[in-house]
Image (cartoon, rainbow, N blue to C red):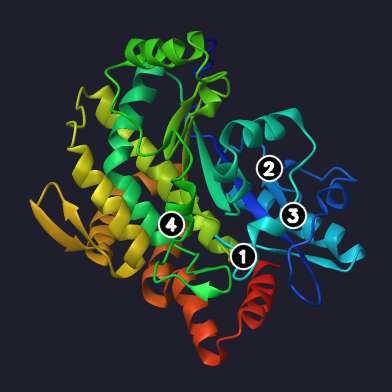
Amino acid sequence: MDQHFQGPRYTVGVEEELMIVDSSTFDLVSAIDTILGEQPPCGTVQPELLESVLEIATSPCSDIAAAASELVQLRSFASGRARVSDMAIGAGGTHPFARWEDQRVVAADRYRGLIRYLGFVARQELVFGMHVHVGMADREETISVANGLRPHIPLLIALSANSPLWRGAPTGLMSSRVPIFRAFPRVGLPPHFHGWQDYESRVQRMVDCGMIEDYTYLWYDVRPHPRLGTIEVRAMDCQTRVEHTVALAALVVSLVKHLTERAQEGVETPEAPWEVLDENRWLAARHGLDAELFDFAAGRRRPVRDLTVDLLGVLGPHARELGCDIELEGIGDLLRGGNGAARQQMVYDANRDPRELMAEIVARTA
């Protein structure tokens, strides 16, 4: 397998999947070609599976501050391109009232192939996530960090939950995106791999027998990305406020640094029971910041807020060394003021009007 885990360590790249909506009705609009007419000043703007979705992606940045600057520029660029055609850009884990049946698939073989292979499962994937790439310099360290991230994925889901509505009504979940996307194969928590050789051989077996084209068809919550030389965290809902995106990215890169240094010291994360990790993942999607997750160190369930405070205490020195301690403070804002799902619920509950909610999402995205 071609791999480029050569460093530098702890570079950061952030991807956001955004909605293209009509500026008056806030309905989704199949208009990705309109947005793609020009190149952004930095990073990239790309299509996704559906024509009403665009993906912005920063370049590999030296630090969180640079990634934050690019994200602001990319959101501004996409919003400006949309505005010319009476459209707007929105950021959230789901569109509050859109229906997947009304969406068009992008005219590209990769996406048409997904529809042919997955059918309804791919068509109904009208959800929006954020991905964080962190540069790595050693393939064995990368596998160790991927294993170490597995117990932290539910906490990231709880903090980032931003999709309480689906098809015009509340779902009772803080992240509806998580169970919707779970219908895809090869998603959720990844296996625990016993080193690079184990990872490479298991992926190659699936490629050789025609199950997948390559490792990019493994859509796990966290995965090595050998071609880019990164570890990629894919578990989180897209954030409406860009400062929350930045704070979560700072949390991820600080956590990766912590786990990398543990791997260098020979400390391996024990293989936790999958069923407990998966139940934590469900509880995080269901309750968000109000979830109680099983803490393996304590041997009991503990509130997300307490677990987050503990983790921030561990990661503080790493964030300072990376120069992202100020950005990491945005996690405290999430704990105090509520995550995106809490904000959406408050706005929706006032008038039970999903279009009013979408207008709020558009305003805060810009």
Q: Quadrant of residue 73?
A: bottom right
The residue beneath circle 2 is 49
Q: Identity of the amino acid at label 4?
A: Leu
The residue beneath circle 1 is 95
Query: Closer to the N terminus: mark 4 or mark 2?
Result: 2
Please state the total of marks drawn on the protein image: 4
* Any part of residue 14 in sight: no
Could you give the CA–CA distance between mark 1 and mark 2, rounded to whole angstroms? 15 Å
Give the structural element (helix, strand or loop) at label 4: helix
Measuring 62% from the left and 47% from the top, which residue is drawn there? 123
Nearer the observer: mark 3 or 4; the answer is 3
Could you give the CA–CA distance between mark 1 and mark 3, rounded to whole angstroms? 11 Å
Using the image, tell me which numbered label, if any, was put on residue 52.
Answer: 3
Q: Identity of the amino acid at label 3?
A: Ser
Query: Closer to the N terminus: mark 1 or mark 3?
Result: 3
Q: Is residue 305 left or right of residue 288?
A: left
Residue 234 at x, y = what percent?
48, 42
Query: Closer to the N terminus: mark 1 or mark 2?
Result: 2
**Mark 2 neighbour class, 10 Å CA radius: few under 14, some 14 to 19, many 20 or more:** many
**Mark 4 neighbour class, 10 Å CA radius: few under 14, some 14 to 19, many 20 or more:** many
Give the structural element (helix, strand or loop) at label 3: loop
Could you give the CA–CA distance between mark 4 and mark 1, rounded to whole angstroms? 27 Å
Outermost bottom residue = 351
Which quarter of the rendered picture does the C terminus lie within? bottom right
Measuring 31% from the left and 26% from the top, which residue is drawn there? 144
The residue beneath circle 4 is 328
Give the structural element (helix, strand or loop) at label 2: loop
Could you give the CA–CA distance between mark 3 and mark 4, rounded to whole angstroms? 32 Å
